[in-house]
Amino acid sequence: MAEDRNQTTEEKTKPIFRNLTADDPEPETTEIESLCMNCEKNGVTRLLLTKIPHYKDVVVMSFDCEHCGFQNNEIQNSGKIAEKGIRIKLQVKTPRDLNRQVVKSDYTSVKIPFLDFEIPSKSQRGEITTIEGIIERTINGLEQDQSERREKYPDAATQIDQFLEKLRKLKSLAEPFTMIFEDVSGECHVENPKAPLQDDGCVTVQFRRTTEQDHILGIYSENTDDTLLKPIQEGEYTLEQIEGEVLSFRTNCPECNCPCETNMKLTKIPHFKEVLIMATVCESCGHRTNEVKSGGGIEPMGVKIEVTVAGKEDFSRDLLKSETCHMQIPELELEIGPAALDGRFTTVEGILVAIKEQLSSSTAFTGDSSDPETVKRMVVFISHLNEVLEGKQKITLVLDDPAGNSYIQSFSDEGLDSGLKITKYERNFDQNEELGLNDMKVQDY
């Protein structure tokens, strides 16, 4: 009886979305009888709730019809929508690039400028595939119903045949080409085969969605004009009260999706600015997160901060990484985008430990499909990080924040800290575009 109770308790504590591992050879799936769109008889759809590491919770759907043999698979997002859209520009030069894994959502459009060709987001469902798989599916789609088209529109059929030949040449890499993924939901992801090193062939840019793009995702902002003009009533919080209070609100755990609470506090970092610190603790799975957002808006100029990390004293420096900040460690050829670690208020040592923990939990170390070369590269990289944390290797930590909201503590109030270099710079057009400033009207409004 005790064993049965323990087993029942263990089953209840299992998260809804679980990682696919060799320890869980038979993951829980749900089977639903559904209509086959090919022969209009009933087939079977299987649903699997799982996690894509460094991405999010997804529902993987697979359809199979035993009558006509038709098969189909797709994925759907099961978490919250990202705050920004994402645009990924990939240079395809080698066979390894053709084999890069791609996670496409329902809202991802694909462009090949070399052929002046675009696959609209509505024409393909979300899926996990490769660059070559996208090209192959496009070829198969254009080849469908060609016999009827040749009879009615021979000229159009000839043009399609010529275009198909160009697509096939892309697969043979007759010459390098560029592929652009644009996803208004911000959920598209392209594999970095050099992870954890910088991906030289891929450029990722986040952008703010327009009102029309928000409506495509089903996001509608409430009319808050009346509340903005409403005076503070008795019993409501004033700014002074908010600064001294820890506010709590209900949310879902990003790890197991169970209900939990997020605590939020407005505080001021000495010699810097006000920030919002948010912390979430899940009682169900024990997952903890902390995130920092700037409370003072976007600064007039971007900031680049370089700090030399050579010992314990440098590890103790306070560090604020905003949600728009890029991080680099040139000695380790490491570059981390803004979304990788979100906004954090920690120390130099804390951010290095966070990088190590994220890389250690990567699927490069687990699963039957792990690439031995990637595993070896990860092990070597983490060993270098351990040497840095033990003070055996000197590095330079670079924070590059176009919004100017990142900060590293100086050991001198007069700005004579030899280990710290702060450079402010004018943002370029692309950086302003990513921050949503190019379309912002602030004069004669």
Image: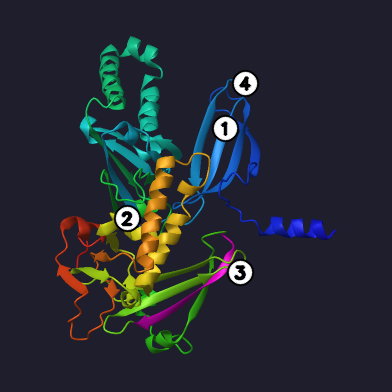
Give the CA separation, mark 3 to mark 2. Answer: 34 Å
Q: Amino acid at mark 3?
A: Glu
Q: Earlier in the sequence, mark 2 or mark 1?
A: 1
Q: Quadrant of residue 12?
A: bottom right
Element carrying mark 2: loop
Horizontal side of residue 13 vs 84, given as left or right: right
Q: Earlier in the sequence, mark 3 or mark 1?
A: 1
Give the CA separation, mark 3 to mark 1. Answer: 36 Å
Q: Residue furthest front?
A: 392
Q: Which residue is mark 1?
A: 63
Front disc: 3 or 1: 3
Q: Main secondary structure of the magenta part?
A: strand
Q: Which residue is mark 3?
A: 283
Q: Which residue is mark 2?
A: 209
Report the disc number at residue 358. none
Front disc: 2 or 1: 1
Q: Amino acid at mark 1?
A: Phe
Q: Which residue is mark 4?
A: 67
